[in-house]
Image (cartoon, grey):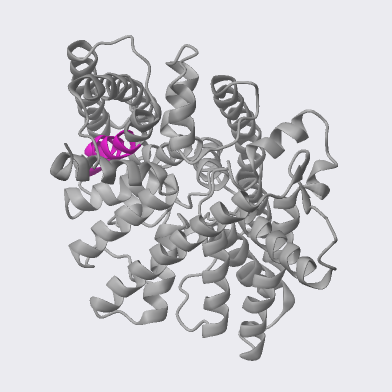
Amino acid sequence: MLLKPTPKQIKKILYYLGRIIIIFGFLSLLPLLVSVIFRETEPAFDFIIGSGVCFIFGFILVRVFKTDEELNWIEGMLLVSLSWIVAMFLASIPLFLSRHYHSYLDACFEAMSGLATTGLTLIIDLEHLSFAHNFWRHLLMFIGGQGIVIVALSFLVRGSSGAFKMYVGEARGEKILPNVISTSRFIWTVSFVYLCLGTIILGIVGIAEGLKPLRSFFHSLCIFMAGFDTGGFSLHSQNIIYYHSILIEIITISFMILGAINFKLHYSLWTGNFKEIFKNIETKTFFFTVLISFFIVIFGLAQRCFYPNLVIYFRRGFYQLISAHTGTGFTTLYSMKGWPILSILGLIVAMGLGGGSCSTTGGIKVFRIGIIFKGLFQDIKRILLPESAVFSEKFHHTQKLILEDTQIRVCLQITLFYIILYFIGAVVGVAFGYPFLESLFESTSASANVGLSCGITQPQMPALLKIIYIIQMCVGRLEFISIFSILGLLWAILKGR
């Protein structure tokens, strides 16, 4: 029998939740600077209202539930889940006030899509959305890509022993530096350095392509946040194809791959250990899965002679594949209508696999795929070798590690959970009358936090399906553990003692 949470536990969770909400309130003031730069009056009031709600709500929780006690494991997990849910509701306030959404539910969908770095959108008339609101959509991806709780660990927590519980609860199981607070600050340092470099490079390219300087650097800032954090939001409904620039496409591919790399690997690169790229199990697995899924996509397109030359195959086929595999959702297509079934299946596989663990991407993660195949090869060796033979399978992940049965089992469990999640959404889509393949594509895109769409995600789709996709985006981003903890809490409240 599960134990009901005690008032003391609830007090701790709500206190730390209040602190996170206050930080979120400060972040929601940043679009005010954009509204001042571009002289937008009404959007400024939307964000004053949104941040005001955050401050009021946050300060009430901090004052009423003030405590100096640390969080335990289950409390840290519950805090993470609640933080993401509350952040969605608060982030959606200025979006809804923009009057570019049919309902508050649609604004919540957009907010969760941004925070979970998914990129599916229900916005109406994107071309006329204000600069401030557009910046907020992309900033949500930058916040969510690094992690809401990572913000708290970087700027709020002072060496808390509860920090690691929160860190793990946000689907980050690897410490880069000796403690998670230093790790969190390193993640933000890397992200800000890349943000500055990426914005400058893309801004210069944008000017060369004909954009005015201020507009070019604004576009560059937003594109980088959506690309590096593998989100896929864009400033125009045509997405990346709006720019009609192969140079911008090549640069955004590099952003997507950077975002899909484990931050632990970024640390190796920053410290000069470039050999790690060629030895790491994640990078090797990523290379092979990209190769295989790209072959599937291209084979399907080539059978139908879909594009006239190799350059177009690269700009359409390879770009969608990298966008899908890194979980970004950028596109250089006006529509996927007419694509061969085999090519769509290739994209579904790529989306489902995802990028590196402890990165900004979603999906199963190539680390787990690599471990599962290592385990498979280990079992084959056990069958082929004599019974008296003793051996151990090893793999390289910033250091030489011995493959253990526990690792394989955990990787298989998480992979199975993701596959079930993909198919649940597909079944719900079919129940609402959509074709199975399109439903599976959209469900995988939502659950793996990708953002590519075959046309199902629209403001007119059923409200229940919107809610299902919101849940999938959140569950896929947090990788089940935190979500299971909040479900356990609800069950304990109802049935516990």
**148 in relation to 319, above or below:** above
- For the N terminus, give its image quadrant: top left
Question: Going by the image, does 308 lie left or right of 284?
Answer: left
**45 in relation to 400, above or below:** above
Residue 150 x, y percent position in the rendering: 47, 28
* Foreground pick, 92 / 210: 92
Q: Which residue is found at the position 82% from the left and 48% from the top?
A: 279
**Residue 84 part of the magenta segment:** yes
> Picture quarter containing residue 63?
top left
* Foreground pick, 180 / 225: 180
Q: Which residue is found at the position 52% from the left and 63% from the top?
A: 352
Q: Which residue is found at the position 85% from the left and 42% from the top?
A: 275
Q: Which residues are magenta?
A: 81-96
- Residue 424 visible in this rendered orientation of the protein: yes
- For the C terminus, give its image quadrant: top left
Residue 10 x, y percent position in the rendering: 22, 25
